[in-house]
Amino acid sequence: APPPSGAAGRGAAAMGSLFRSEPMCLAQLFLQSGTAYECLSALGEKGLVQFRDLNQSVSTFQRKFVGEVKRCEELERILAYLVQEIRRADIPLPEGEASPPAPPLKQVLEMQEQLQKLEVELREVTKNKEKLRRNLLELIEYTHMLRVTKTFVRRNVEFEPTYEEFPPLENESLLDYSCMQRLGAKLGFVSGLIHQGKVEAFEKMLWRVCKGYTIVTYAELGEPLEDPETVSGWPAAGAHLQFPGAAVAEPMVPVSPLQGEVTKWCVFLVSFWGEQIGLKVKKICDCYHCHVYPYPCAAEERREIQEGLDARTQDLHTVLHKTEDYLRQVLCKAAESVYSRVVQVKKMKAIYHMLNMCSFDVTNKCLIAEVWCPEADLQALRRALEDGSVRAAAGASRPGACVSTLSSWRAPSTGPCCVQRVRWDRGCARPPRAAASSALTFAGVAVLASLQRFPGCFPRVERALLYGASLPLLRWQRESGATIPSFMNTIPTKETPPTLIRTNKFTEGFQNIVDAYGVGSYREVNPALFTIITFPFLFAVMFGDFGHGFVMFLFALLLVLNEDHPRLTQSQEIMRMFFNGRYILLLMGLFSVYTGLVYNDCFSKSVNLFGSGWNVSAMYSSSHAPAERDKMVLWNDSVVRRNRVLQLDPSVPGVFQGPYPLGIDPIWNLATNRLTFLNSFKMKMSVILGIIHMTFGVTLGIFNHLHFRKRFNIYLVSIPELLFMLCIFGYLIFMIVYKWLVYSAETSRAAPSILIEFINMFLFPASETSGLYRGQEHVQRLLLAVTALSVPVLFLGKPLFLLWLHNGRSCFGVSRTGYTLVRKDSEEEVSLLGSQDIEEGSSQAEDGCREVTSEEFNFGEILMTQVIHSIEYCLGCISNTASYLRLWALSLAHAQLSDVLWAMLMRVGLRVDTTYGVLLLLPVIALFAVLTVSILLTMEGLSAFLHAIRLHWVEFQNKFYVGAGTKFVPFSFRLLSSKLGGDDLV
């Protein structure tokens, strides 16, 4: 039957898809070259199909649209540069909620030209701004250098001695230029700035190289200055950014600082004699990256330079301010559309990556793509192709070539049609009549544009057939005015399709738990449907505490109620993990509240909601008649005074008045044997839950065998597995429940041990035991016989049956009707097809069934695979049953940790007298809350979470779940990141 269409079909698919993955089909898309871009844009918006790469043997750089991909990468580089400059200017980036569509082809060149002009303008303005800022920093350094070196000269002039005609040289200041001129020496100066950490090494180098013929004077600047040489390093023209969704990793952009590096400087003044020494001093300054500036010798020259520096500094400040204002205006204007441009370029690049997966037909006019599509979305796929063709025709106003394509349009009452193309030369006035008439002989398919362009060239045809097959073309041509639409048709295949399971925000977390084990094989039973209940329940069995579960429930409820808050969706990784699993936490907390009520644990304390079912006063001898006192062990005042521990006897009338309405009776919280009682209860409960869980997993495997038409697996695999499981471990559950129901408080002392009886079932003791019931020995021997018979069937049944089929025997319970896609698991997977045509969907009994095996039937490999599987299952039944005892162990550990925390903190705080009790209780409660959240909720909760995952993956899912499929990854623009966050720009 065809898949349901419309809203009802989508609803049915969505309801049934969680139990089993959706049925898929392989479709072939015929995309005309002029409309392929718009068609893929429409498909990307809807996210319906997964493309197959038809050019796997072709290198990435040799594909058809590699030039367009490079153009998109160039646009990405420009946009990344714009975003980087906008953020440096502290301009907010608007991020819209709506995602703009991919740009039409006619707007791509215009957008590229605009972005390139904007980039050139920004780079030019930024380069000028850098140059101006560098000049300004150099002027500031020069000003500081003049100010500091002026103090050097003043300091030496103040201590200069009175003038003598021939003063002794040792008494004369060497820094006095006029004095040195009188001596006839050629004195030179080199001044500038050097990093503070290089001063000592610089001075030593001058002394060693110049051999003492220099005098170095330096002083530290009071304030740090920016280094002009570090105001550089902007993105190069060929640099790229890494955008999410890109198929090829791209080089990163080095992020340069907004300003120059701020460092501490020292001003130096080197005095030297001779030109050769001066050259050495200048080379040393270059080696240590000193900023050297001219040193004025005369005071008048110094004053003129200072005035010029002040004027130029003021002018540069003005020009820089105007440049920054202009740059900010340009960036503000660019920020208005940069978000939409980034999203559009990402979509355009994704479209061309998909087009590179398509192949061209022989005429090089049509692209052929193969896609996986859910059967429920076939109508939506056809509408998307039609919308893309209409959009492309509306955007292109040029007439098409004289080419007609006879496509496989499916009329309402016709089957699949063949495809044939008829091509005429452009100069031909009228097409050949024979070619035109032969083209129309195919099943009701015609090209209406050819009929209208060449009237009178075609012979008579059935008008009803022509009209019915041309209805889609009539509507398409009426809306678009084009002549050649894009179309699709489904093709049969035996390849395994990808797995698609539709989820919502509630089921997504549970599906992720299953997918972490392995993506389900195509059309096999999906464990996520049952994990929604079993996972939080098994977690709650290990985390059973009313108070802790309620705190977890409130935390998850807070996340659910605020799930649209942007800070939660954009939070850090750990918080985002909690947010993505908010519905899992919600159910885990809710189930923990339930199991906490069953265990009657609230922060390790019991709550008496309904009144205890035990009556202590009934144990006193005064409450009974004298005749009853001799038959029972009762209490009196002396017994109560002498014994610190008293035992309640439920066989005494009036002591036990009935079970507690919900969970464990609160009186057990006061009992000294509370731990022994709870251990026995939780251990048996863990075994019962584990065996039921595993048996349910084996039962789900039957649904897989029924769906894949392998009923022999039911008789030869599933039923023996169930018999093996139930005859041993199912009987163990029966004994536990039977003992609970049959034996009462009066007869409990005569009840046999379940463990001893279970061991005797396999040992066959010589002496007779009392047993649980009459005829127990015969029942146990029968169950062991059934178990022993199921093992050889499990080991040899399936291989021998497949060998029997391979030798040409008739099939038994494995007939198959119609054509379906087949899952290929291994060589032994057998699919049987009927002899009738695929469309008839029926097979006749006299034809029997045909066995279609894989390349070669290998009985040895099938036998070894089945033997390994059987051994693993038989041993796994024992180990997996013991593995479920972790439910008891972690529940015990959680309860004991809660009790220890209460005893060490809250009990101490509550026992302090009233004078200091209130002051001490507040910090004790705070510490108790912190330790409860950090240890009992976080650490214990994580431990129980991991153990619950293990129970589902190993003990439950391996009974029926293969998990060897591939996930359906549609071509969808929603998978592209639409945020301008750090991931897009780093």
Image: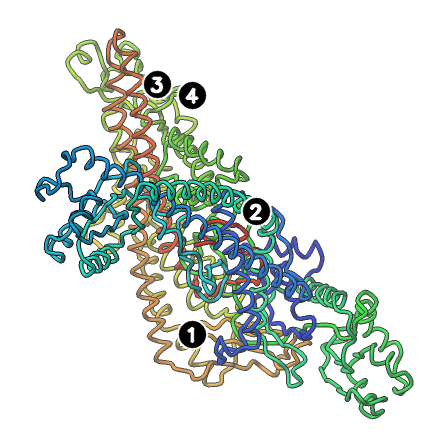
Q: Amino acid at mark 2?
A: Tyr
SS at mark 4? loop
* Callout 1 touching callout 4 (CB < 8 Å): no
Label 3 Cα neighbours within 10 Å, binned few <14 / some 14-19 / many ≥20: some
Q: CA distance from mark 1 to mark 2?
A: 69 Å
The residue at the far front in this view is 165
In three-dimensional space, the C-alpha distance between marks 1 and 4, rounded to whole angstroms, equals 59 Å
Q: Name the amino acid type tagged 4.
A: Phe
- Label 2 to label 3, Cα distance in Å? 95 Å
Front disc: 1 or 4: 1
Residue at 63%, 78% in the rendered image: 843
Name the residue carrying label 1.
826
For marks 2 and 4, the one nearer the N-term is 2
Residue drawn at (14%, 34%) of the image: 162
Q: Are marks 3 and 4 in contact (CB under 8 Å)?
A: no
- Residue, disc 3: 654
Q: Is residue 380 above or below residue 293?
A: below
**Which element type, helix, strand or loop, lies under badge 2?**
helix
Q: Earlier in the sequence, mark 3 or mark 1?
A: 3
Q: Is 865 left, or right, of 808 in this rendering?
A: left
- Residue situated in front as seen by the camera: 46 or 97: 97
Q: Which residue is labeled 4 in the image?
A: 610
* Picture disc at residue 326: 2
The quadrant where residue 487 appears: bottom right
1 vs 2, front mark = 2
Question: Where does residue 790 sit, x and y in percent of width and height?
Answer: 36, 65
